[in-house]
Amino acid sequence: MRALVCKQYGPPSQLTLDELDDPKPSKGQILIKVKAAGINFPDVLSIEGKYQVKTEPPFIPGNEASGIIEAVGEGVERFKPGDKVITMSKGGAFADKCISDENTTIPLFPALNFSQGAGFMVTYGTSYHALKQSAELKEGETILVLGAAGGVGVTAIEIAKAMGARVIAAASSNEKLEFAKDVGADETVNYTKSSLKEVVKELTNGKGVDVVYDPVGGELTDAALRATAWHGRYLIIGFASGDIPKFAANILLLKEASAVGVWWGTWAAKNPHKHIQNIKELGAMIASGNITPRVTEEFTIDQYKEAFQVITERRAKGKVILTMN
């Protein structure tokens, strides 16, 4: 099989496309012929050796894929060869074939194609867990979504709207904000041209937002935190800006606000039954048309350098997908 291999930590451009032996499933595992794989910002951090959990090179990156089951290991009961599936793997997705555990794999939703399926698990799983379990978002509340046109930002907008919230989308360009409005955002803020804090306060009549969804970090954090309401919840999703922010504890105190870390993959592993329930509820949202996974750019595995540039240069609008030949 062909696979992208990280032989030493560094930028994604240093990955190599190699021929490797096909992997074999062990007990409880399945072998998937990959049709498409989703690229996420944590993949970049993993390749650079900067992710919270490090994988020592050499390794095949990629944590979400869709495809067709080719073989199953001992004890696998839920799937059989020929089934179309979506999976969250522990690496290895950027390849013609990958191994995944049975319990982190779900059937491909009938309404989705392989590319949409490949972009579903991480972004929608993260955002739904963040809004449902971490923030306990309620109907009628207002949420500020930073990095609103990116992979997780788009899903946060969709899911928040499906949960009955009002959404203020923040991004760095009018083009990205138009995309966020098409997804369902009620209001927008271009934080390169206006004060994020002041615009949000104006849009909320001085109250501030109930929830901040932040996959960006960096210099936006302080302004977004100051734009929260009494008992606001600040969701720490990631640090796409590259800068890990420090939180002003006095602001948290004065607002009785909460800063909440969101690490969906570990939460899902520790709470498998709640995770499965979340996936079922997301499936119902897809079936009803309340959410629609958006693939805005597709690249073949041979074009991996161009695909990763979209992520590292923060040009992504929606989901970026690698397809296998």
Image: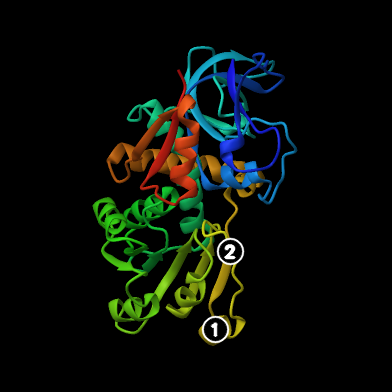
Quadrant showing the C terminus: top left
Q: Is residue 287 above or below residue 23?
A: below
- Compute the Cα span from label 1 to label 2: 20 Å
Q: How many marks?
A: 2
- Is residue 65 shown left or right of residue 151? right
Which residue occupies 65% across, 16% down?
20
What residue do we see at 64% from left, 14% from top?
22
Which of the two labelled residues, at mark 1 and mark 2, occupies the earlier sequence position?
2
**Hey, what amino acid is under mark 2?**
Asp
- Mark 1 or 2: the one toward you: 2
Residue at 54% across, 82% down: 256
Image coordinates of residue 269 in percent, x first then y, are 64, 43
Q: Is residue 53 above or below residue 71?
A: below
Percent position of residue 233, x then y: 50, 70
Instruction: Note whether 241 is above or below 49 in the view shown.
Output: below
Q: Which residue in the protein does label 2 denote? A: 243
Q: Is residue 10 left or right of residue 154?
A: right
Give the answer, above or below, for where 289 lies relative to 126: above
Q: Residue at x 57, y 34 (%)?
A: 62
SS for dot 2: loop
Is disc 1 in contact with disc 2, using a CB cutoff of under 8 Å? Answer: no
Image x and y of residue 298, in percent: 38, 32
Mark 2 surroundings: few (<14), some (14-19) or many (≥20) residues within 10 A = few
Q: Amino acid at mark 1?
A: Ile
Q: Quadrant of residue 101?
A: top right
Q: Report the residue marked by disc 1.
A: 251
Q: For numbered disc 1, what is the local secondary structure? A: helix
- Horizontal placement of 210 versus 234: left or right? left
Q: Quarter of the image containing the N terminus?
A: top right
